[in-house]
Image (cartoon, helix red, strand yellow):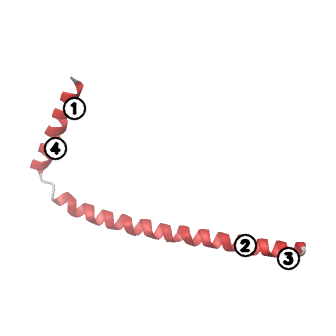
Amino acid sequence: MTIAEMLQQSAILTVLGMVIVFAFLWLMIICVNLVGKLVHSLGKNANRAVTPEITAAITAAVTEYRKNEQD
C-alpha cells in the first residue's frame, strides 16, 4: 500500500467518522427536543392537579421537618 493510498483511506475514514458523529448528534438533539416537549406538556397537566390546600400541606410539612432537624 502506497502513501497516497493510505492518505486516501485515512481521508475517507475521517470523513465517514465525522458524518457518523454529526448524524448521531443531530439525532440526539431531535430526541432531546421531543422529550422536552413531552415533559413540558405533561408538566402543564400535572400543575393543574396541585390545589392550594395540597401546597399548604406540603409547605407546613417541610417547615415542621426543618424545625425538627435544627433541634
Which one is closest to the eye, mark 3 or mark 1?
3
Q: Secondary structure at mark 2?
A: helix
Question: Are the residues flagged by discs 2 and 1 in contact, CB closer than 8 Å?
Answer: no
For marks 2 and 3, the one nearer the N-term is 3
Q: Is residue 47 left or right of residue 40?
A: left
For marks 3 and 4, the one nearer the N-term is 3
Q: Disc 4 designates what residue?
A: 58
Q: Residues within 10 Å of mark 2 (few under 14, many from 20)?
A: few
For marks 1 and 4, the one nearer the N-term is 4
**Spatial CA span between label 3 and label 1:** 71 Å
**Spatial CA span between label 1 and label 4:** 12 Å
Q: Disc 2 designates what residue?
A: 13
Please state, as top left, top right, bottom left or bottom right, where the C terminus lies in the image.
top left
Which one is closest to the eye, mark 4 or mark 2?
2
Residue type for callout 4: Ile
Q: Secondary structure at mark 4?
A: helix
Residue at 53% from the left image edge and 70% from the top image edge: 26
- Farthest top residue? 71
Relative to 8, say whether 70 is above or below: above
For marks 4 and 2, the one nearer the N-term is 2
Q: Residues within 10 Å of mark 4 (few under 14, many from 20)?
A: few
Q: Quadrant of residue 12?
A: bottom right
**Spatial CA span between label 4 and label 2:** 58 Å
Q: Secondary structure at mark 3?
A: helix
Q: Residues within 10 Å of mark 3 (few under 14, many from 20)?
A: few
Q: Disc 1 designates what residue?
A: 66
Residue type for callout 3: Glu
Q: Residue 5 — which label?
A: 3
**Spatial CA span between label 3 and label 4:** 70 Å
